[in-house]
């Protein structure tokens, strides 16, 4: 395929991704999911698409699907803090605290995260690797959920 066709294809992809974001922002989740699923078929290696899909599922309360989408985004972009935080939070909300902690540790082993650094004292008792008794009461904080509402081009 020639470069002009590639540019046109990328432009169409970007336009559809923007449309999916607008649907998500207007709480038109079915429309956003429909577009994002189609984009995932066209460009399965796009961490942005999978991360945005995870966010839409999370907003709908479809945690199992959100976990799958964020997991895929972290596989495609292991250094994406946004994808990692999304995965952490949906795992936590799903009651999978050990898996959430494992994701936090995975990410922190390869990169720095101010958000995770702020959570560590709440999650880990006395500097050891076990959760404190009160940590299960921790909910994803609103700052974190809001940070996941940023455009998916941040997931790289």
Image (cartoon, grey):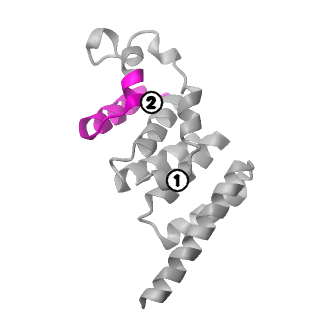
Assign a secondary structure to mark 1.
helix
In this rendering, position of residue 123 left or right of residue 28: left
Residue highlighted by disc 1: 152
Q: Residues within 10 Å of mark 2 (few under 14, many from 20)?
A: few
Position of residue 16 relative to residue 151, above or below, is below
Residue at horizontal 50%, vertical 51%? 51
In the image, residue 90 lies at what x, y percent? 51, 36
How far across and how far down the image is residue 105, in percent? 30, 32
Q: Quadrant of the N terminus?
A: bottom left
Q: Is residue 116 magenta?
A: yes
The image position of residue 56, as x and y in percent, is: 62, 48
143 and 37: which is toward the camera: 143
Residue at image coords 45%, 43% = 82
The answer to which of 138 and 68 lies nearer the viewer is 138
Determine whether the residue tagged by mark 2 lies in a helix, strand or loop: loop
Q: Position of residue 101 (x, y in %)?
A: 36, 28
* Residue at 26% from the left image edge and 14% from the top image edge: 128
Q: Residue furthest bottom?
A: 2
Q: Which residue is mark 2?
A: 96
Q: Residue at x 59, y 63 (%)?
A: 17
- Please give the range of residues in magenta: 95-118
User: Would you say residue 1 is visible in this rendering?
Assistant: no
- State whether residue 150 is above or below residue 6: above
Using the rendered view, name the quadrant where residue 132 is placed: top left
Q: Residues within 10 Å of mark 1 (few under 14, many from 20)?
A: many
* CA distance separating discs 2 and 1: 25 Å
**Closer to the camera in the image, 136 or 150:** 150
Magenta segment: does it hold 64?
no
Q: Is residue 51 above or below residue 107?
A: below
**Mark 2 vs mark 1: which is more N-terminal?**
2
In front of the other: 36 or 62: 36
Magenta stretch: dominant secondary structure:
helix
């Amino acid at each position: 395929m020639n470069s002009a066709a590639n540019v046109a294809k990328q432009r169409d992809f970007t336009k559809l991704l923007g449309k999916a974001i607008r649907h998500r922002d207007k709480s038109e989740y079915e429309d956003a999911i429909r577009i994002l699923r189609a984009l995932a078929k066209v460009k399965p290696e796009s961490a942005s698409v999978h991360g945005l899909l995870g966010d839409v599922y999370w907003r709908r309360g479809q945690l199992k699907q959100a976990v799958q989408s964020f997991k895929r985004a972290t596989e495609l972009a292991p250094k994406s803090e946004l994808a990692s935080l999304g995965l952490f939070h949906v795992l936590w909300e799903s009651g999978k605290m050990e898996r959430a902690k494992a994701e936090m540790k995975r990410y922190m082993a390869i990169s720095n995260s101010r958000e995770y650094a702020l959570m560590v004292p709440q999650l880990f008792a006395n500097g050891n690797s076990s959760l404190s008794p009160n940590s299960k009461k921790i909910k994803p904080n609103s700052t974190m959920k809001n940070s996941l509402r940023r455009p998916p081009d941040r997931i790289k």
